Amino acid sequence: MKPRRGVRPAWQEPPHPLTSTAKAVAIVVVIALVAVPFLVVVSTSLASPADVVANGGWVIWPEHPSFAAYSQILAGGVVSRATLVSAGVTIVGTACSLTATVLLAYALSRPKVFGGKPITLLVLFTFLFPPGIIPAYLVVKQTGLLDSYAALIAPVLVNTFNLVVMRGFFQSVPAELYEAARLDGASEWAMLSRITIPLSRAVLAVVGLFYAVSYWNSWFNALLYIDTPTRWPLQLVLRTYVLAGGQIADPSTSEAGLLSAPQTVQMAVVVLATIPIVLVYPFLQRFFVKGVLSGAIKS
Amino acid sequence: MSDSPDLFLPSRLTGPPTNRAGLTAVSRRSLFKAIGLGATAIAAPALLASCGKGSGGSVSNAGVAKVPWPTYQPFAGPPPDLPGTAAGVQAGYTKYPSSLVSAVKAKPGDGSRVRAVAITYGTPPRPVSQNKLWQAVNDRLGIDLDFLLIPDADFDTKMATLISGDDLPDIISIGGGHHLPHEQEFVSSECADLSDYLSGDKIKDYPNLANLPQYAWQGMGRIKGRIYGIPLERPLPGWAMFIDRDAFNSVGANDASWTKDEFASAVKALSKNKQYGMGASKSNQFGLRQYHCGSFGAANDWKLYGGNFVRADTLPEFKEALAFARDLFAAGAYYPDTMSISTVDMKTYFYNGTLKSATDGLAAYAPNVTSTKGKFTVDLALPFHGGSATPGIFAGGGTFGYTVLKKASPERIQMLLRVLDYLAAPFGSKEYEFVHFGIEGTHFTRAADGTPTPTALWKDENTSVTLPIIYLAEAPRVLYFAGVDAQSVKRLHDWEAKAVPVAVKNPASGLVSDTNNRTGTVLNQNLNDGINAIITGKTPLDGWEAIVKKWRDDGGDRIAEEYAKEYAG
């Protein structure tokens, strides 16, 4: 339809005040939907138990702010110790995982590798059928890893999905490069370290991030394999704070009421667990986007 | 099971990898299927976990010779201000005893390493090298305690792996309302039979264990006629309805002998301006089984008719109570989100006056009193007269759980029993003081009147939350609460004195039904879902018969038969 003479198309007109207001309102509402829960989390973590009770559990603005919940968590050295454990497992684990994944992915990406196809299938099989909890536990136990930090790394050393992504990326390196290198007398090791790895920095960063985040976040393996509480990683320890005094559903269990108003502590835990990710994420976000895209589009 | 051993679930992050990722042979569709399969495989451990070890065969007590229960031998310690009764009224102490006695003669342990596993509701302890309490526990018990703690939420999963691993700890505490798959089969095949140490008069070698009341032993029950464990005693009344006494007084309600109409009009009168007369949480369904059923004279879970077991839910008193709760809900007397709020939230609303009553575990009394100090008087409601039957309260199992020992030589079993005997030293003994308050000068200081007052260190090092040795063995609980005034202690004692004589026991408590072990959880869930639907008005009251019939057909009748057989045997 032709626009009326003298009337400019909608996108050229200065916005109607009503439209502007509506837009502003919409933006404020959307921001509020995101920001208010954050505010509540932070405020509740800073509130006093009396504030929490007076407000019925959730505080928007603490009347008597205090860091009592944080000091309760951080005092005693349990959390700081667990932070060290988590950091160590994350750093060592990521390094080991990346090395193992690169080596395996490279081998499986090269054509005519002896046994390449059966091994690929074997790896993919674990992707489809991960072991159950008890078989995995028995393997860890039989290999003597129980209650050691290695139990947090070895069972999840190579993630099949990450391997498949990396192998795909390696396969996209032009075969001519390898041929040229081969003519110059390069060994497999030289080709991997001088050609494949330098060309694959993006995927290495992404897969490394995937590994690091999952090591940092994981708690379930520690629950199963680590018996000594002093070796628990941060997430498992923080989890006990969230669960403390929580649901006790049995009449014979009259343990209810061990802790009052633990909402402050729970929210402090949420804040503490979020901080590292909040600090790191803005700088690494672009890699995440790349990682999501790599393997998604055929170039 | 929220976190899988897999590091990343790919489908959340990306679309399925395509040819670029080197999956030439795998089509998009089949990969999706595969991911679905993977998810199934991740869910499978739950099923696997339910196949624990079992010796096979029944663990029933029917038709087998039964060893006698341990002889009850009460502890002769400082006399209480408010006497207890053998029936289950707890002894009350309004002040801390001025002179303590010794309940243990010699150091129980032999210095060896003892692995123990227990549930925890708290945060992990500091390592033993930095933990004065842990060091003292090792020293006084004469053992090197290696303590494995399992958070409440993960108890079932972790125990399933432990049991499957063939490397059991020496002391295993099972409790907190958790029932392991094939629990009795596991205990009877893998754990030590303690009958030869504890049954009858033999328990007198362990005087503090002999001080555990008989209802706790019975609540734990026997397996194949034998005693395998040591119960963790809890007061007989499991649940209570806590009320804001001032609010109930303000509407002229008096629970000394109230009828159902007086009760209903009181809670309705208190329900206005976003305040509600009835408070309950998702773990105690509208207080139906915890308060109303007893008031209507319903049976506690099961009723025994001349050797036959009938489920209380199928009887008319239960339906009357159900109809009563439904009417209260329709009248707006319940907090609208009762079905979904947690116990913690319910307490918060009770403390801030939104709720005028709260159905909760009896142990919530002391925290309730201290948290509402100066705001209102917390009291416990007596049951109302619901109909022709005598009103009562429901007795709990009398236990938190029980402790079993790994099979070992008789000497080692005796040593472990001596350790547990130490932990069970009764109130008024020096050992109790250590187990419950720690070391004088380090974990507590003594007030002028002798009352132990916890120091700041007790928050990080204590025996109930961070190093919960009280879940290995514990003295019978008494009414003594630090920081609670004498009048409040007396109020609870008065309530118990009236409530315990009308406490209705569950005749099936301590009996074994294989069907119940297998399917009881699912069957009860179906019943409870039906109850929720009826009280909230989603299902008509007449729908109850169909729900009950489904329960009977799905296995309820078989459970009743098995209980009857076990009871007769």
Image: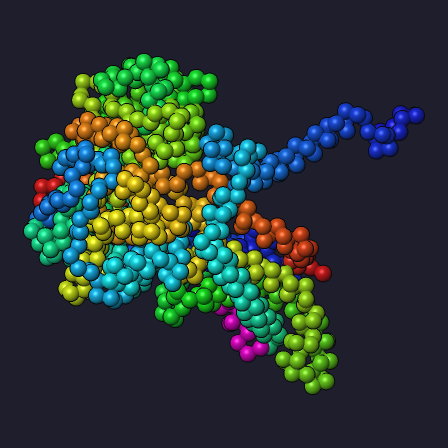
Horizontally, is B183 left or right of B376 in the view? Answer: left
Instruction: Confirm whether residue B521 shows in the render.
Output: no
- Please, which residue is most extreme toward the right here? A6
Horizontally, is A50 left or right of B496 in the view? Answer: right
- The range drawn in magenta is A113-126
Residue that appears at 20% across and 47% down: B100
Residue A79 in magenta stretch:
no
Of B338 and A51, the residue lying toward us: A51
x, y (%) of residue B164?
31, 60
x, y (%) of residue B85?
14, 35
Q: How is the image coloured?
A: rainbow
x, y (%) of residue B173?
27, 53
Residue that appears at 58% across and 50% down: A275
- Assign the C terminus of chain B to one quadrant of the image: top left
Residue that appears at 60% across and 36% down: A36
x, y (%) of residue B263?
30, 17
Residue that appears at 22% across and 39% down: B478
Instruction: Confirm whether residue A130 shows in the render.
Output: yes
Q: Main secondary structure of the magenta part?
A: helix
Horizontally, is B232 left or right of B248 in the view? Answer: left
Q: How many marks?
A: 0
Up/down of B200 relative to B482, above or below: below
Up/down of A115 relative to B561, above or below: below
- Please, which residue is most extreme toward the bottom here? A185
Of A65 and A287, the residue lying toward us: A65
